Image (spheres, grey):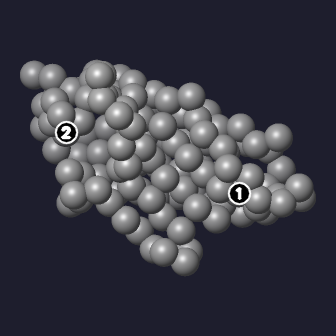
Amino acid sequence: QVQLVESGGGWVRTGGSRRLSCAVSGTIFSIDFMAWVRQAPGKQREFVASESSGAGTNYSDSVKGRFTISRDNAKNTVYLQMNSLEPEDTAVYYCNVITAGPMGRKTTWGEGTQVTVSS
């Protein structure tokens, strides 16, 4: 069974940086797709960033140039480096991965980590 554990959330001052981590546990052969989405209070969940071998890296216009999605295959961990944070970035951030494993491909979501940006 594939599980995700997110970490790195918390309070950060406007203009600051934060790195979110998403550790993938379970028996997998590879992470074929990874993404971060977020949901701000009272708003719908929105796409932030994604990466796959086929489609490359994509970012929403609101975070392009400030956020970077990456991975460490040896650690089966996905990251979201967030720089120049703004109050509008305040949200619960969710990790989403599609993995290949002995039971085939599986889509898994994390439980979310809160990021609060203020001055």
Crowding near the residue tagged with mark 2, few <14, some 14–19, many ≥20 C-alpha atoms within 10 Å: many
Q: At 72% from the left edge and 63% from the top edge, which residue is drawn?
A: 30
Q: Is residue 8 visible?
A: yes
- Residue 88 x %, y %: 18, 34
- Residues 81 and 47: in front is 47
- The C terminus: image quadrant: top left
Helix, strand or loop under label 2: loop
For residue 91, the mark is none
- Residue 60 x %, y %: 29, 56
Sequence order check, earlier mark of 1 and 2: 2
Q: At 48% from the left edge and 75% from the top edge, which residue is drawn?
A: 55
- Residue type for callout 1: Thr
Q: Is residue 76 visible?
A: no
The residue tagged 1 is 99
Q: At 58% from the left edge and 61% from the top edge, which residue is drawn?
A: 33
Q: At 43% from the left edge and 39% from the top edge, which residue is drawn?
A: 20
- Residues 12 and 50: in front is 50
The residue tagged 2 is 85
Q: CA distance from mark 1 to mark 2?
A: 30 Å
Residue 13 vertical position relative to residue 78 in the rendered view, above or below: above
Q: Quadrant of residue 34?
A: bottom right
Residue 69 vertical position relative to residue 114 in the rendered view, above or below: below
Question: Looking at this rendering, what residue extends furthest in the left direction?
Answer: 119
The answer to whether residue 45 is left or right of residue 83 is right
- The N terminus: image quadrant: top right
Residue 63 vertical position relative to residue 92 in the rendered view, above or below: below
Helix, strand or loop under label 1: strand
- Residues 93 and 29: in front is 93
